[in-house]
Every structure is written in structure tokens, then in C-alpha cells.
Image: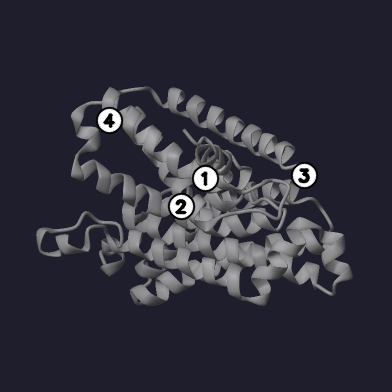
Amino acid sequence: MNRKPLHRVFARLTDPDTLARLGPLVGLCGVFLMFALLAPPSFASGGNLETIARQTAIVGTAALGMTMVIIAGGIDLSVGSIIAFVTVIIASLLQSGVSPAVAAGGGVLAGAGCGLANGILITRLRVVPFVVTLGTLLVVRGAAKGFAHEQKIDAPLTGLNDLLASLPGERAWLLAPPGVWLMAVLAVVIVLLLTYTRLGRHIFAVGSSENTARLCGVAVEKVKTAVYVLSGAFAGIAGLLQFSRLTVGDPTVAVGIELDVIAAVVIGGGSFSGGEGSVLGTVVGAFIMTTIRSGCAQMGLSNWVQEIVTGIIIVLAVALDRLRHRKSGQ
């Protein structure tokens, strides 16, 4: 028997690049099968799958922005606070009588503004992103609470509430709520941006080697600022989806969601060293995080167990990333 073809197949499957591409998808299948066997039958029901998709739309949309940040060698810890702030802004605008489109646009612009503040602080003050965004995490969360007077803001019902609402029977042909399809469209946009635009190439260049990128004429500070503005805008869109799910402005929502967002990017192949990231991997990673939370909830596990599992996943993802870099000689 000729073993060379099998050897080549095995070598290709164990290649670091192949593992990076297929690993997240294999992980998602494994996690889903595990809970399908261990959790109650309701876990694999159509209704729960729709719920997982709705929850993933929020995490996944914010993770798309985080993907660009991590590829550029940065990090953004403020996305959860931005999401909460945007829900408050949207609810306040709707309460004041503006149209849903204006309210949604205002919320996304508020998110982009928070991202712009992060970018300016990081590039002008030359402070590491971890410290800056840790500070803005608190500042933006405090601003959301102050703006809402530390209470939820009720808003009139509008079409925005349908973005992540369960599909009625006559719209079952959509298969998933509009917010889920919005995440998919945004994912395609980011793929095109990273693959075919100068900004996308510069994002990878800055993350791979900032000094080399600067020597090649890349405007590093502008690229970093643009990346954080985009991250804030995508967190703003995630805030819009969060508002749709809650139907109120809540300054206390999305606490800790930045951990799920960062974990989704790293599980999907992003590297804290910069220069690496996959949009498809990020979306799959977001599905992994929400599937785990849903499975734990279906099994009746306490919230603290879910937090431990999330923490373990983040550590394992970073450890696997380091191992992959050592094997590839980087």
C-alpha cells in the first residue's frame, strides 16, 4: 500500500496554517456535539438555535471591529461599555421623537466617537492600548450611567426592535432575524476591506511590524486611529442590536462582553502579536462562545461556571496561538 498520499494528507492537515483555518470550525462542531449529547433535547431545537444566532450577532458584530484592532497589534477593552452607552443614546433619541434611522445613526456615530477618542489617546499620548482602553472602559460606562441617571431608559416601539426579534411565521423564510444577516453582510465588508484595500494592507503591515511599516511610508498613527474608529463603529452597531434585543437603553448591560469578543477573535486565529486574523474565524469563534453559554444555561449550570469556562477558553486559545507561532518558527 502506498503511504505517501496519506502522509501528504496528514502533513497538510497538521500544517500550522491549515490548523489555524480549520481549527475554529472543528472546535465549533465539537462544542455543539458535546452539548447536543449532554444538554437537554431543547438545546438542539430550532428555537434555541435561533437564540444562539441572535446572541452571536451582538458578540460577532463587535468582534469584527476587534479583529481589525488585534490584526493591527492593539486591543480594545472598552467595547462592552460602548455597547451600553449606545443603547442609552438610541433610547434617548427615540424618546425625544426622532426617527428610528436617525436614532440608529446617532448611536453608531457615538460608538465611532468613542473609538476616535481611543485612537487619539493611543497615538498622540503614546500610551499602550491596554491602559487607554481600560481607562475608557470606565469612562464610557460612567458616562452611560450618568446620561441615563443610573436607570433604564424606556423607548417607544419602532422597527429597530425587529432587528433581533424572533421571526414570525410569515417571515420564517428569512431563517434568521435581520440582525444576524446584518452581521453576515458586515463580515463580507470587512473581508473585502482587509483583502482588497490599501487600508487593509496597511492594517496587516502595522500589526506585523510597526517600525517596518513606518519605514515603508505607512502612516501608522492614521491607520491605528482608523482601526479604533472602526472598532467603535462596530461596537455601536452591536449596541444597536443589543438595544433591539432589550428594547430599552440600559447603562449596565454588556458588562464583560469584551472578554467574549476578544476570545472570539483569538479563537478564530487572531494573534495578540498582531499581523494575523480571520474574519470567518472570528464569526465562528463568536458562535463558539455563545454556544458554550447556551449549553451551560440549558444544563442549568450557574453563571460562575460559565465564567470559569470562558476564562479557560481564553487561556487555551492564547496558549495554542503561542504554540502555533513556535511551530512556525515565528
Name the residue tied to disc 2. Answer: 283
Q: Earlier in the sequence, mark 2 or mark 1?
A: 1
Q: Is residue 310 above or below residue 47?
A: above
Q: CA distance from mark 4 to mark 3?
A: 38 Å
Q: Position of residue 207 (x, y in %)?
A: 74, 57
Q: Earlier in the sequence, mark 3 or mark 1?
A: 1
Q: Earlier in the sequence, mark 4 or mark 3?
A: 4
Q: CA distance from mark 2 to mark 3?
A: 26 Å
- Which amino acid does the dot numbered 1 rest on? Ala
Check if mark 2's residue and mark 1's residue have beta carbons within 8 Å.
Answer: yes
> Depth-wise, is mark 2 or mark 3 nearer the camera?
3
Image position of 270 (left or right of 251):
right
Name the residue tied to disc 3. Answer: 330
Image position of 101 (left or right of 89):
left
State which quadrant residue 324 falls in: top right
Q: Which mark is residue 36?
A: 4
Can residue 297 be seen?
no
Check if mark 2's residue and mark 4's residue have beta carbons within 8 Å.
Answer: no
Q: Nearer the viewer, residue 112 or 325?
A: 325
Q: Earlier in the sequence, mark 2 or mark 4?
A: 4
Q: Position of residue 56 (x, y in %)?
A: 39, 49
Name the residue tied to disc 1. Answer: 264
